[in-house]
Image (cartoon, rainbow, N blue to C red):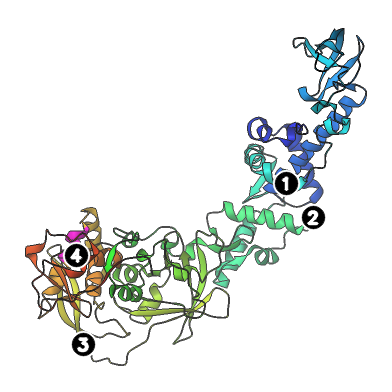
Amino acid sequence: MAAVRKLQTQTEAFWRDEYQPSDKDLDFVAELILEAGKPQRLGALAAAIILRRYQLEKEAVARQTKNIRLYQPKGLYEPGEELTFSALDYKIGRVVAVRPGHNPRYGPFSVIRVAFADGSPEREFVAGFDQPHPLNRPIEELLGGSEEVDEASLVRAFEHYVARRLEQALAANASFVRFDDAWFLRELMPDVHVGYLNLAEAMIYEAGHPLPTREILGGLELPTTSSTEAQLFALNCALSADGRFDNVGTAENPVWYLRALEPEAVFRQPEVLKPAFRAFGGEYVGITMLDLIEQIGDELDDVETATPQDLATTGVHFEVNFPHLYAGTMPATRRFLRLLPGEERSRLPITFVDSGSGQRFQVWVIPEGRYVCGLGDWYASVQMVVGGQVSVTPTDEPLTFTISARLTRNRRGEWVRSASVVNDTLALQMQRAVIGVRCDPNMLLDVPNREEIARLMARTEAAQLPLEALVRRAFEELSKLSGRGVVHAKSLYSVANLLRRTGAVPIFAELTRRACYDPVGDGFWAYNAALQSAVYHTPDEMRERPLSSRGDLIKDQVVPYLGK
C-alpha cells in the first residue's frame, strides 16, 4: 500500500530547495515580536514559520477539496463532472468522456478522459474499479496532512533550512535589529545614546571588573516606556556597536568589559607563543620522559588522544618557560580548560588569588590560543624566572583559582645559567643571581635582558631554524657548561624555547630518534657528532641504540606519545 501523500510543507525538498521567506513571512515575524514585546530567537521564529506554513497549506487543501469530488478508481463519474486528484498535487480536472474498459483479469470497468484546468495534456483514468488500489482507501487518508503530525518533529527536520534563509532576509530588512541570535523591531527599541554609553564606561571602570548587562542597565535609568527585555536588548546592541566595550560573557548572558583594560594578548596572540613545533601524538619517546613532559606542563604537548581526568581537586602544575614569562601568560592545557565552564568562548575572564598575599587579580583564558594572559604583574611581584614552578587550583568560588609559586628564603644568590645574545647568537654562561621562587634546577635560566632574547626568537623564527638544528644548537651551548659534556632533556627544552617556540615532545622525540644522542641516566643525554646523520627507525633500535659505544648508556623503553 502506498504511503499517505504528504503536503508540500511536510517534505524536505520544499524547505531545502524551494522555500524563500516572503513578505508575508516577515510580516508574521514582526507580529510575533510585537505581540511578545521582547526579542525573539531565530530558531523560535523559524519554527513559527514552519508551523504557520503547514497550517495554511493544510487549510488550503481542505478548501480546495471541500466542494469538488475527490477522484478514486472505484468511483463512477459523468461527463462534465469536476474532480480533484490527490496523487497529482490536487490538480482539478473535468471529465470530458467516458468509455468502457476491458481486462479479463479484473472484469468490467470504465475509463474516463479528463481535461485539466491548468491546461496540461488530457489523461485517462480508470473508474468503476472496485478492486484493491492505493487510491481506493478512505478519503480522509488521501487528503494530505489529515493524519496526525508531530509538530516538534516537523520543526526539528526543517528548522535549519528556514533559519538560514530567514536570517538573511531579516538582516536585509531595516525594520529588524539583531543581537547575537535574537531579533527585535527597531521601532520598539529605546534610544541608548552616547551619554548612556559614557556612563556605562564609567561604571565598568569604577568596578574594575566585567559587569553583566542587567547590572549596567540598573545604573542608567533608561525611559520606562519599553519593557526590561527591550531595554536590555537595546543596551546590548549599543554596547556591541561601540568599540570601547567587549562582551566577555556568553551569547545568552552578555558580560561587558572595557577593551582599554584588557591585555593586548586578549585580542592578539603574542608572537613568542606562536608554535614552531608541537606534539601530534605517536612520537616515540623514552618512557621515563613521560614524567618530564608532565612536570613541564606545556600546552603544545597536548594531543587529541589525551585521556580525560578528574582534576577538580588537584588543579594543574607547570614550569614557566621563557615565551610565557616574557608574554605574561601561562599554558591553557586541556587539563586546565576542563576546570572551566563547557560553553565555547573566544575569551573568558577568571580570577586568580595569590596563595601568599591573598591578592586577587583578573586574567583571561584564550581557549583557541591555548594560553591564559594577564599574569605579567604577578610574575614580577614574585620575581618569576624561567623554570619557576607554579600551581593553579580551583576554589569554591566560581571562576576563581588559587595561584601559587613557592618563595625561597635564600637571598644570597646562587650560580645559575644566564642567557644573553652575543653577535646575534644565543650565549649561555654561569652567573650569580638571586632566585626568589622555587624552580626546577634543570629548567632554570636567568634572562637579564628579555627583550634581546625576544628579538633573537623573532630572527630565528624568520629564518625557520629546523628542529634538528634547534636541538643541536641548544645542546652544544648547554654542554659547554657541563664538566661531563652531558645535558638534561628539560634543560634542552628550556634553552630551545629561547630560540623558537616548541613543546617538550618534539625535543624529546628528536633525542630519541637521533643516534648522535644517548641517554646516560636521570634525564641526561650525551652527544656524538660523528653520528649526527644516523637515525633509528624502530622502537627496538631507539631503545638498544646499536650504534652507541658508550659504557654508561641507559636503555630506556620507548613508547609512542599519547598525551599528558
Identify whether 271 is placed above or below 385.
above
Q: Disc 4 or disc 1, which is closer to the eye?
A: 4
Q: Marks 2 and 4, Cα distance to the nearest angstrom? A: 79 Å
Residue 541 - label: 4
Amino acid type at image mark 2: Thr
Residue 30 found in image quarter: top right
Q: Which residue lies under the disc numbered 1?
A: 153
Assess whether residue 295 is covered by the magenta stretch. Answer: no
Three-letter code for the amino acid on which mark 3 is drawn = Glu
Q: Report the residue at 45% width, 87% height from top.
A: 357
Mark 2 Cα within 10 Å, few/some/many (few <14, many 20+)?
Answer: few
Magenta span of residues: 467-473
| Secondary structure under the numbered disc 1 in the rendered image | helix
Between the C-alphas of marks 1 and 3, the distance is: 72 Å
Residue 414: assigned label: 3
Q: Position of residue 443 (x, y in %)?
A: 26, 77
Residue 398 in the image: above or below residue 263: below
